[in-house]
């Protein structure tokens, strides 16, 4: 169930929504969980960002990026510096939007694990939703690796896979993975549709196909199958909606344009 400003009655023109946005809206309206939004704008922003997340996942799949462990990761050194822990640090003077878009445009120059793929997809979705100016103002010092490092997206974690929607990140755990291939201890995925996921290194598959792929990476005589965990992750949409370039002023000394930034941090959609 969706409540906007405390009311179940609200108006969104379905003609302005994509097919995936309409589907998310309908499924949330039918849910037994109550999703609360402060305004229609907040709901529309989430729908748009989720749609862009799905599009970014598909674009990454088609980009030609390769799967690589942290030890073997690679990046386009024109825009990124590869760090000792296998992450990518944006080079000084490079616009964040340029760095992110390059991954999708020159994928053959990049290789990373599935956790890094999820973060990259989220950044691309945010970029496509808020636009270059806001993205470049707020994400100047980009460092790409995994959940532990990329906290500026204000990721929210819930624990009910039955309440996952397109654009959410989920995790398939492989408890009996082969110890010689720790990279297959699980697979981070983006939900694209009902029982359809993108996992970097596996591709776009159903849950059964992903489980079967992970099971092939278990040690000999393993008895526990891979499975989809309850963990569900997505950015704080209301926080991201509040990012805006409020003032533009000029530095009289250098003549260079500078951006003044203001953030409105909200609570996002709450679940009860």
Image: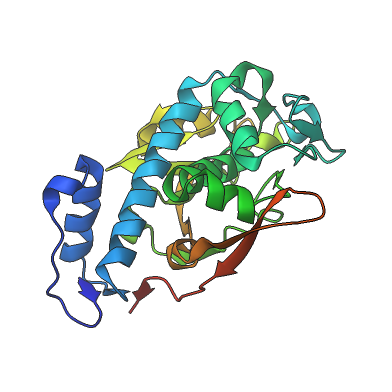
Image point 61% across, 27% down: which residue? Answer: 102
* 239 sits to left or right of 87: left
Image point 45% across, 31% down: which residue? Answer: 212
Tell me where residue 123 appears, x and y as whole percent: 55, 45
Farthest right residue in view: 84
Colour mapping used in the image: rainbow
In this view, the residue in front, 160 or 38, is 38
* 66 sits to left or right of 212: right
Name the image quarter holding the N terminus.
bottom left
Q: Is residue 90 above or below residue 270?
A: above
Tell me where residue 46 appears, x and y as whole percent: 35, 58
Is residue 225 something that shows in the picture? no
In this view, the residue in front, 201 or 251, is 251
Is residue 2 something that shows in the picture? yes
Image point 33% across, 66% down: which residue? Answer: 42
The image quadrant that residue 160 belongs to is bottom left
């Amino acid at each position: 169930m969706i409540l906007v400003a405390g009311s179940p009655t609200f108006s969104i023109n379905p003609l302005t929504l994509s097919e995936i946005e309409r589907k998310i809206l309908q499924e949330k309206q039918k849910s037994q969980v109550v999703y609360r939004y402060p305004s229609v704008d907040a709901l529309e922003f989430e729908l748009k960002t989720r749609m862009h997340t799905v599009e970014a996942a598909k674009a990454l799949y088609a980009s030609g990026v390769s799967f690589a462990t942290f030890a073997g990761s690679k990046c386009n050194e024109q825009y990124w510096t590869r760090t000792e822990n296998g992450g990518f640090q944006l080079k000084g003077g490079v616009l964040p939007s340029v760095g992110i878009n390059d991954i999708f445009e020159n994928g053959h120059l990049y290789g990373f694990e599935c956790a890094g793929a999820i973060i990259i997809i989220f950044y691309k979705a945010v970029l496509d939703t808020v636009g270059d100016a806001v993205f470049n103002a707020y994400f100047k010092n980009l460092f790409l690796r995994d959940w532990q490092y990329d906290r500026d997206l204000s990721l929210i974690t819930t624990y009910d896979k039955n309440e996952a929607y397109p654009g959410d990140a989920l995790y398939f755990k492989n408890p009996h993975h082969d110890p010689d291939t720790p990279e297959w201890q699980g697979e981070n995925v983006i939900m694209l549709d009902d029982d359809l996921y993108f996992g970097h290194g596996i591709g776009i598959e159903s849950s059964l196909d992903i489980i079967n792929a992970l099971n092939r990476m278990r040690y000999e005589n393993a008895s526990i199958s891979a499975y989809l965990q309850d963990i569900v992750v997505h950015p704080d949409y209301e926080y991201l909606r509040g990012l805006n370039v409020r003032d533009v002023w000029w530095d009289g000394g250098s003549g260079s344009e500078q951006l003044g930034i203001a953030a409105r941090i909200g609570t996002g959609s709450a679940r009860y």
